[in-house]
Image (cartoon, rainbow, N blue to C red):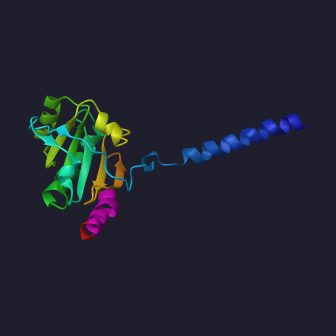
Amino acid sequence: MNRFIWPLVIFLVLAGFLFVGLGLNPREVPSPLIDKPAPAFALPQLHEPKKVFSPQDMKGKVWLLNVWASWCVSCREEHPLLVSLAEQKIVPIYGLNYKDKREDALMWLVRGGDPYVLSAADVEGRIGIDYGVYGVPESYVIDKQGVIRYKQIGPVTSQSLRETILPLIAQLEKE
């Protein structure tokens, strides 16, 4: 009798873990970088490759770093929202063009509008790895001290912008 109970108990425990795991939202993966300094980098700018951009340039400012690519389907989804946000001048948006061809990225910005103050070109994806990018798009709210305060996995939506990102930016601007 005992030899039948143990396999049943093990099966029920595994089924319980599976049930709980299936109920989790994969977009809510906590980032170990929250409340830590943004990883440093110095990358060529997409529009002017002879110029370099670094997060150090942003010390003293609250800003949004958006990781994007011309080949990214979800980036097309969030792009009009970013263009609208840029027009409102609430927060400067900087792009990190991820694993993309320069020509394709520039053409994509011409077609869809360019919401970025500038975009840095992460051609090999090394900086994306430092930031813990799971896949594009991802966005980071970075405070005046250069600390990551929020990470949006997946496209920015009007709901995430309204309920989380903009209130956080307003709070960080006051600090």
Using residue 73 as the reference point, say whether residue 45 is left or right of it.
Answer: left
Q: Splitting the image into 4 quarters, where does residue 13 fall? A: top right
In the image, is residue 137 part of the stretch drawn in magenta?
no
Q: How many labels does the image show?
A: 0
- Residue 159 screen position, x and y as percent: 33, 58
Nearer the observer, 91 or 148: 148
Is residue 80 at least partly visible in the picture? no
Nearer the observer, 2 or 42: 42
In the image, is residue 166 part of the stretch drawn in magenta?
yes
Is residue 10 at least partly visible in the picture? yes
Which span is picked out in magenta? 159-172
Which is the main secondary structure of the residues drawn in magenta?
A: helix
Residue drawn at (54%, 48%), measured in percent from left and top? 23
Using residue 152 as the reference point, say whether residue 29 is left or right of it.
Answer: right
- Residue 100 screen position, x and y as percent: 22, 31
Rendered position, 159 above or below 80: below
Residue drawn at (25%, 40%), measured in percent from left and top? 68
Give the quadrant of the N terminus.
Answer: top right
Q: Splitting the image into 4 quarters, where does residue 52 fall? A: top left
Give the quadrant of the C terminus.
Answer: bottom left
Q: Residue furthest bottom?
A: 174
- Residue 32 screen position, x and y as percent: 43, 49
Q: Splitting the image into 4 quarters, where does residue 173 fall? A: bottom left
- Residue 22 screen position, x and y as percent: 55, 44
